[in-house]
Image: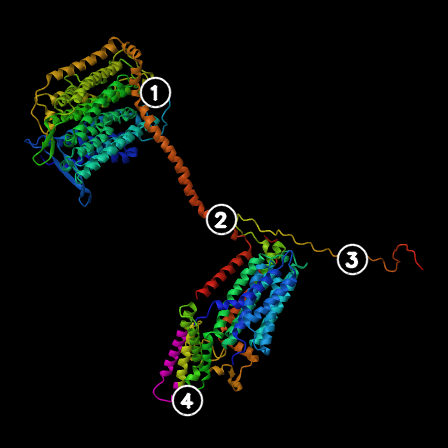
Amino acid sequence: MTPELPLHHYLVVGAILFALGTIGFLARRNLIIMFLCAEMMLQGVAVNLVAFARYRGNLEGQAFTLFIITVAACEAAIALALILMLFRNKRSLDVSLWQELREPRQEPIVDEEPLPTPEREAPNPVLTQAGLEPEHREEKSHV
Amino acid sequence: MPPSYLGSFGPIVLPLLAGAAAIYLLLPRPRAFPALAGALLGGLALVLAGGLVVGFNVLTPESFLFYAFSAAAVGFGALLVTQRNPARAALSFALVVLSTCGLFLLLAAPFLMAATIIIYAGAIIVTFLFVLMLAQQEGPSDADARSREPLLATIIGFVLLGTLLYVLQLQWNYETTGEGQVLNDLARNIAAARPVSEESLKANDGLDRSKILKPLIVALEAKEQQVKGASPEGRRGAVLDREKRALQDLRQRLDSVFDQEQASRPPTVDEANATLARLETTVLQAKQQYGWPQPETASVADRPSNLSPYSGPQPDLPADQVRADPAAGGAPYMPAENPAYLGRSLFTDYLLPVELGGFLLLAATIGAIAIAHRRTTPERT
Amino acid sequence: MSDVSYLLWLIPALPLAAAFITAFLGPKLLRGQSHWPCILGAAGACVVSVIVFWAVYSTPGEGKPVQVVSYYTVFHAGAVNVDFRLRADALTALMLVMVTFISTLIAIYSIGYMHGELHSEPHGERQDAHGHGHGAAVPPGPNYGYPRFFAEVALFIFSMTMLVLGDNLFILYAGWEGVGLCSYLLIGFWFTKPSAADAARKAFLITRIGDVGLFLGIMLLWVGSGFHLDYQGVFDNFPHDPFYVTLACLLILCGAAGKSAQFPLYTWLPDAMEGPTPVSALIHAATMVTAGVYLIARCTPLFVQAPVAQLVVACIGCFTALFAALIALTQNDLKRVLAYSTLSQLGYMFLGLGCAIGFGGFAADGRPQAGPEATAAVSASMFHLFTHAFFKALLFMAAGSVMHAMGNVIDMRRFGGLRKLLPTTHWTFLIGALALSGLPPFSGFWSKDEIVGAAFVAGHHSFSFGAVYYALFIAAMATAFLTAFYTFRAYFLTFWGEERIPEEAGGHAHESPAVMTVPLVILALFAAAVGAVLALPPWRLFEAFLVRTPGFVEGPQSPPEYLLMGVSAVVAAAGIGLAYWMYVARPGTAAQLAHAMPRAYLLSSHKFFVDELYDYFLVKPVVGLTQFLRIIDQYVVDGLVDIVGNIPKLLGALFWPIQNGLVQYYALLMVLGLTVFLLALVRYR
């Protein structure tokens, strides 16, 4: 019994996940998010493999995926340790701070566009002490 | 009979452009574009992808779940990439994992679904969130509000995606509309001719040639019509002519296989099986010659496998029994027993990788501790 | 002719071996004894030369004894065959004996003269061109002068003997270049002195100009004669077309004029006096400068076919003789006087060669040969070369002896009256001066008289240029007068008058040691006697011997021209008398004459400004061209190379921005590469 959905559909999904992961890895500057995007690429590959396993009728793809998960776990552990070390050095998770390996004649790339200042939230209102009559203006009461 | 190249490109262009625009608009910037525009474009891209690339199928539970899970996966993936707050990005990654696990479930891999959820969403993401809380307690930092080269990254990523989709589309077109369809139908017919019974042999005086070769005959007639319709000097005429000749060549080869039947009519069961095997070989060779790389050997029966019976069905198992469990009386294997078979497969065929994987985990543990250990002496930067 | 083939190679080989031994072992091992290899080599070569001479001389009969020995083939390509061939005939034997004998004597003389080189600070003739003593010392330090000198002298003897012995123009040219090189090395012996280095370079360059002509002439002869380089092959096979023969002869003359210092390539010879005096004696009096004369004499069978070329030779020779004599009248440097007198006598030799007109037809085997008058003229030239070698070497060596005693001062105005102080030097110098002046019975008289006689005869016999030859004859007579005059002017200024000794002598002016005076005496004997012995009619031994060279035809013995001989003697005596009157009897006369003719005096004492003319018209444009080319080389060529060298740098600079240190850029490029790869894979599946 062949499955109803063709293999092609699952491969498309895997490809899209992989491409999104690539974009995220290249575009984001936070080390954690970069790593998460790399993990998403691995997810796309896993979808591919499991789909092939299903359509070939054996368990090769699933076994391979299991090992991918294993390796991903090891990789996550080491990556986090390294990220922690990098963080300790610069007190920031920004990957752009690490530019020392550039060409000697190159200038470092710094952010030029300023961030918009966040709107100042309105300060909390000051309330009078409870139980006291608030000051109010003298009004003529129109009785 | 090679697939046409340009025809594969059309369906993927629009979704790609829409998706690229969406991602580009949504990537974090100091002065961000309105999120609504990006989100609408992203939705449009998803719909177009669903329609053009994947194609709407008959709405069965399976296909509905597929669409749901894959849309969720893609959507949360886009969210992960474009989210400013890193904690929210981590959470969206968890949802991506959940969606892909849904897909795993659809693909009859329940163990993997569970394993992925436990390890990824359970362990990895939680660890990441811990590190994030340790490092960026104030929430999104300045760096999170910026992207490195959003335009270039988007373009490159979507060019990569375009390449992959293009390749997939080529194969898909070939399989569904072109001569691949003919070959697939032929293969299906040949497979459907099994098992060969003595009665059918006697009744039809051998294998039913016209029934088996019906798709090919139909395609040949259609191609001849097309050739008559097109001008012979034009380019299209030349391509069509080539395709027609390829089909004729295949017809001849298959006919010659039939004609190699031995003198005794009707043939015996073994002879009929042998003929069917040769037909399969011919069809596979045609697929290889005109289409995409195929397994090296001809028939399923000759395909070598290094795997034990625990990892998959034996090569000489008939096609319609591949998913039949002899212990259950021929009923198909339940996905629920997938863990058992997976376990057996791992400890017989993949024993060495399992042990190495364990060793790798041990090394990673020690390594992580060694790297991240806070030294008592002041660190040298 | 008895077989001397097993000996011929020794003549160049012994001095060459001496040169190597002195060069390699001299500085460290031999040191003060470095002269022995050179002297033994030169003496050995002399002995062998005498043996060869005897072999040629003692050949019986009237035949022309020639022995050609081919030792090995230098290169062989198709029809072209160049061998290392040495030749022994009469002309060669004469030259060899003269060269090796005088070289040996000068080498012995040099032991005493170059003695100062043994100390670390070389004593040298630290004089500039005007004869003033320098105060500046040559920087001290071992320059191994003593072994270097003898090695170079031995190398020179090797080259000269090769030049003379060679049977083909290839060997001749090799020897030619070799003597040029050794002349350069020896003139610039004290190379740390700027004037010496300049003089060496000048000599080399000017002779190089001549060598270009010689090389072209050799090429023409080679091609024209069907690729023969050996003399006999060239003479036999060169076409008798007068144009080509004249062209070849003029080109050969070009080379000979350079090496033998004829006008206009003579300016190097006076400057060459910067070298040590033995060098001047050996190279610039006796041997190297005679190479040109030898070459033209050797090519006589060609020259007699080209009367125009011979006229040119004669004119150049005579002009040089007169010109140099005029300059020598007013020089104050004793060695300069002798140098100009060398120029003048070389001019005489060329005049003699130029008067060798008279084609002698073809011999029995088709070989061209010189007629009797031509033979007589050539033999006159060679005889003058022979005697000149002896008395000029003697004069130079005596001048060197004077310098040695006077503390390296050579300006005649600073010393005088040295008769009593340096007796041996005085008498030998006197004999040499008498020989040079051409007073009978000294050797110069006989040889000069024969040349003048040849000019007279040529005046008779020349078809188209008779008048020119007569004019040359008159000029030669005048030059003889001037020669006698300036020679004895130098003699009287040096050895007569009141005794004056310059301070550089240091108060110990004495006669030279025996190692220097014995060669002087030997040479003086030869200078006095050899002329009379060899040329006395009716035997005329020299001519009789030279005629045995192939290519010459002996003519009937003409009676001696007594009138001519008498006129020559009278002219010489008149010159001597005038010099006596002007410098001894009335000492102030010369100064008065100089005041009376200031412009003539200026022209003469400044060498007719020829050097200045050359400098202005030839040297300065070349130097300007050099500067221009230097600018091109430095800015255009170097600039081009720099630009090419900078291209990789510029290309590299294009790629620097890729490496900006950001991980994501690198990842971007990786993904880009992956995408391209995938696309290619899809397209070209």
Place of residue B182 in the rendered image (x, y in percent of width and height, measured from the top left): 45, 77
The local crowd at label 1, few if under 14, some if 14 to 19, many if 20 or more residues have their Cα within 10 Å, is some
Place of residue C684 in the rendered image (x, y in percent of width and height, measured from the top left): 43, 65
Contact between labelled residues 4 and 1, with CB atoms less than 8 Å apart = no
The amino acid type found where label 1 is placed reads Gly
Contact between labelled residues 3 and 2, with CB atoms less than 8 Å apart = no
Q: Is residue B250 above or below residue C523?
A: below
Span colored in magenta = B244-271
Q: Which label lies toward us, 4 or 2?
A: 4
Same chain under badges 2 and 3? The reply is no
Is B321 left, or right, of C296 in this rendering? right
The amino acid type found where label 3 is placed reads Asn
On residue A124, the disc is 3
Contact between labelled residues 1 and 3, with CB atoms less than 8 Å apart = no
| Chain letter for the residue marked with disc 3 in the picture | A
Q: Which label lies toward us, 1 or 4?
A: 4
Same chain under badges 1 and 2? The reply is yes
The local crowd at label 2, few if under 14, some if 14 to 19, many if 20 or more residues have their Cα within 10 Å, is few
State the residue position of label 1.
C133
Q: In the image, is residue C478 part of the stretch drawn in magenta?
A: no
Place of residue B316 in the rendered image (x, y in percent of width and height, measured from the top left): 44, 81
The local crowd at label 3, few if under 14, some if 14 to 19, many if 20 or more residues have their Cα within 10 Å, is few
On residue A58, the disc is none
Q: Secondary structure at mark 2?
A: helix
Q: For marks 1 and 4, give the CA distance.
A: 136 Å
On residue C653, the disc is 2
| Chain letter for the residue marked with disc 2 in the picture | C
State the residue position of label 4.
B204
Same chain under badges 4 and 2? The reply is no
> Considering the image in quadrants, where does the C terminus of chain A appear?
bottom right
